[in-house]
């Protein structure tokens, strides 16, 4: 009787699922899973897979987790058969109301289709859902009510150095390496001793520098397009001097150089010193208060060391930079805020100012020079002003 009952329930479930998904075995469509899954259950599977697959990436599994949470927040935790094109169109409508620009909205729509394609490849949903979502058009340029992407502003080295007194030593080294090597934030977060190569160079010694050091990121932006694509970053003497202390303290080659716990502990000590230096504190502090403050700081350091992460990711790195600007503001130093990705733009702008645009494109790792000049070079007007001065010397204006 149990076998008969089980077979009857399975037949009912298959019949109900076939009616909802329009699944036809005679049409030659691949079989699908008969699991009764909602979007939240599919999101957990997708995020777990992403954490394993992208464990060396800048943000392992974070982007997938954020994407699925956003989609469920907008359309609700519906059954996968109810995820229609009409519901999918609600996502760009809601994101427009939230002030997202067109490029971000289109990327979220594309990533959602990638999520559904993964579910179909894993036999969790039918092909109909995947095809319906792909048929929805993306937002086009100059659409009324949709913001366009705001161009980024380049951050030069002189501006980046002003933040150093409010950054932990590890973050100072990350900013230095990112600017002078033209790296993306995710590439500097995953630096390991095994990815560094020291090469003797007579040319470098003639210029007063040590041997050249190269960095081969284990994961980069274009790796998914070509498994054999290699990215090489040149680390100058300035970067090497900053990196040396982190290389020396590494216990093995697979250990990440920059750990969040170091920045946490430095921030705790900085806050303790900052509170002690405030003018509104009394000149005399009882020994008991001093011991209590030091004990609380030690407790926080132990707690953070117990919960430390293996390395920074792009989000936590950017958050630490933002906190440094808050420290500067509390100290009375007003600085214009910037994000880590703007350092890469500043590196290309600096190289262009000295007339080395081709070298700057190679430093950034671009395949085409036009990409660097179009998206990363932000000093065209300043250079044209210098050209105007040269033209005035060649062809001086007539005196009135």
Image: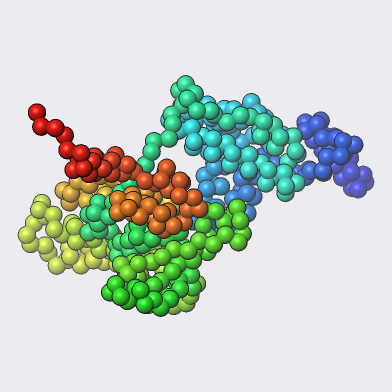
The quarter of the rendered structure image containing the C terminus is top left
Q: How is the image coloured?
A: rainbow
Residue under the image location 43 percent in, 75 percent down: 198
In the image, residue 230 above or below residue 84: below
In the image, residue 375 above or below residue 189: above
In the image, residue 252 above or below residue 89: below
Position of residue 74 measured from the top left corner of the image (x, y, whole percent):
54, 32
Relative side of 335 to 226, left or right: left
Position of residue 266 measured from the top left corner of the image (x, y, whole percent):
29, 63
| Nearer to me, 309 or 102 | 102
| Nearer to me, 74 or 166 | 166
Instruction: Tally the numbered discs.
Output: 0
- Give the residue furthest to the left: 283
Relative side of 262 to 84, left or right: left
Residue under the image location 57 percent in, 59 percent down: 229
| Nearer to me, 397 or 305 | 397
In the image, residue 304 above or below residue 162: below
Whether residue 337 can be seen here = yes
Whether residue 52 can be seen here = no
Position of residue 8 measured from the top left corner of the image (x, y, whole percent):
89, 40
- Give the residue furthest to the top: 144
Position of residue 167 measured from the top left corner of the image (x, y, whole percent):
28, 58
Relative side of 347 to 256, left or right: left
Residue under the image location 39 percent in, 36 percent down: 150
Residue under the image location 26 percent in, 48 percent down: 326
């Amino acid at each position: 009787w149990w076998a008969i009952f089980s077979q009857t329930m399975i037949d009912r479930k298959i019949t109900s699922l076939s009616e909802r998904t329009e699944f036809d075995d005679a049409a030659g469509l691949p079989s699908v899973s008969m699991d009764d899954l909602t979007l939240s259950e599919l999101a957990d599977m997708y995020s777990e897979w992403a954490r394993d697959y992208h464990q060396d990436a800048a943000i392992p599994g974070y982007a997938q987790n954020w994407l699925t949470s956003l989609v469920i927040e907008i359309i609700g935790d519906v059954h996968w058969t109810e995820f229609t094109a009409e519901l999918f169109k609600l996502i760009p409508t809601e994101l427009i109301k939230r002030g997202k620009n067109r490029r971000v909205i289109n990327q979220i729509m594309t990533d959602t289709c990638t999520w559904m394609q993964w579910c179909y490849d894993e036999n969790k949903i039918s092909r109909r859902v995947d095809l319906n979502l792909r048929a929805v058009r993306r937002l086009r340029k100059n659409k009324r009510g949709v913001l366009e992407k705001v161009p980024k502003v380049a951050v030069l080295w002189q501006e980046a150095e002003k933040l150093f007194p409010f950054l932990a030593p590890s973050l100072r080294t990350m900013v230095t390496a990112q600017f002078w090597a033209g790296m993306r934030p995710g590439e500097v977060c995953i630096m390991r001793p095994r990815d560094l190569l020291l090469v003797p160079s007579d040319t470098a010694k003639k210029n007063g520098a040590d041997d050249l050091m190269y960095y081969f990121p284990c994961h980069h932006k274009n790796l998914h397009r070509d498994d054999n694509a290699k990215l090489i970053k040149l680390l100058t003497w300035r970067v090497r001097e900053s990196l040396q202390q982190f290389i020396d303290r590494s216990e093995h080659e697979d250990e990440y150089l920059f750990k969040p716990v170091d920045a946490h502990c430095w921030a705790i000590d900085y806050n303790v010193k900052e509170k002690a230096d405030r003018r509104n504190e009394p000149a005399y502090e009882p020994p008991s208060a001093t011991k209590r403050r030091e004990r609380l700081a030690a407790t926080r350091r132990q707690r953070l060391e117990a919960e430390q992460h293996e390395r920074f990711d792009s989000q936590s790195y950017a958050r630490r930079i933002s906190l440094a600007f808050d420290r500067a503001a509390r100290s009375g130093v007003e600085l214009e805020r910037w994000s880590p990705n703007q350092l890469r733009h500043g590196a290309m702008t600096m190289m262009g100012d000295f007339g080395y645009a081709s070298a700057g494109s190679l430093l950034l790792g671009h395949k085409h020079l036009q990409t660097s000049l179009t998206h990363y070079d932000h000093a065209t007007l300043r250079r044209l002003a210098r050209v105007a001065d040269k033209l005035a010397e060649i062809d001086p204006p007539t005196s009135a």
